[in-house]
Image (cartoon, rainbow, N blue to C red):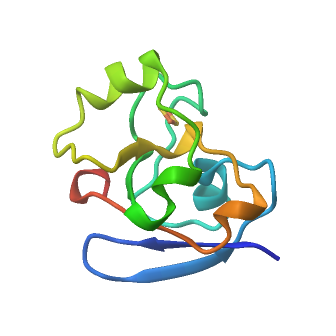
Amino acid sequence: MLTVTFIEHDGTTHRVPAPTERTLMQIAVDNAVPGILGDCGGSCSCATCHGYVHPQWADRLPPVSETEAFMLEGVPEPRGNSRLCCQIKMRPELDGVVVQLPQEQV
Ligand code: FES
């Protein structure tokens, strides 16, 4: 089984199973990971699934769409590796991906 590791802002780590074709947001919600809310259900319209994807996986991620980029402009602490977790589907090449979670979504 593929896995994703979510790291809360306080350092609490959650290594959870990650079925292919589920988004990182769905995987976090499925496993009750605090810090990912997913209020819009994955339609890229709330930004409550904001996370910082470890740079090691940057070249394996899907490109940022115009809509995602627009939504990321509104998050409180954007970084170069900010992504919306609902826009990233799990695939084998993302096995072990690490996503740090921002403080504002607690
Ligand atoms: Fe709303 Fe990702 S769940 S933008």
- In terms of depth relative to the viewer, which is nearer, 27 or 1? 1
Location of residue 29 with respect to 21 vertically, above or below: below
Q: Quadrant of residue 32?
A: bottom right
Residue extending furthest left? 77
- In terms of depth relative to the viewer, which is nearer, 93 or 27? 93
Residue 84 can be seen in this image? yes
Image quarter (top left, top right, bottom left or bottom right) of the C terminus: bottom left
Q: Residue at x 60, y 33 (%)?
A: 41
Image quarter (top left, top right, bottom left or bottom right) of the N terminus: bottom right
Q: Residue at x 60, y 32 (%)?
A: 42
Location of residue 27 with respect to 47 vertically, above or below: below
Measuring from the top left, give residue 91's x and y in whole percent: 75, 55
Q: Quadrant of residue 46?
A: top left
Residue 54 can be seen in this image? no
Location of residue 61 with respect to 42 vertically, above or below: below
Location of residue 31 with respect to 77 vertically, above or below: below
Measuring from the top left, give residue 101's x and y in whole percent: 35, 61
Measuring from the top left, give residue 10's x and y in whole percent: 25, 78
Q: Is residue 13 left or right of residue 1?
A: left
Measuring from the top left, give residue 8's x and y in whole percent: 35, 71
Q: Residue at x 58, y 60 (%)?
A: 28
Q: Is residue 10 left or right of residue 39?
A: left
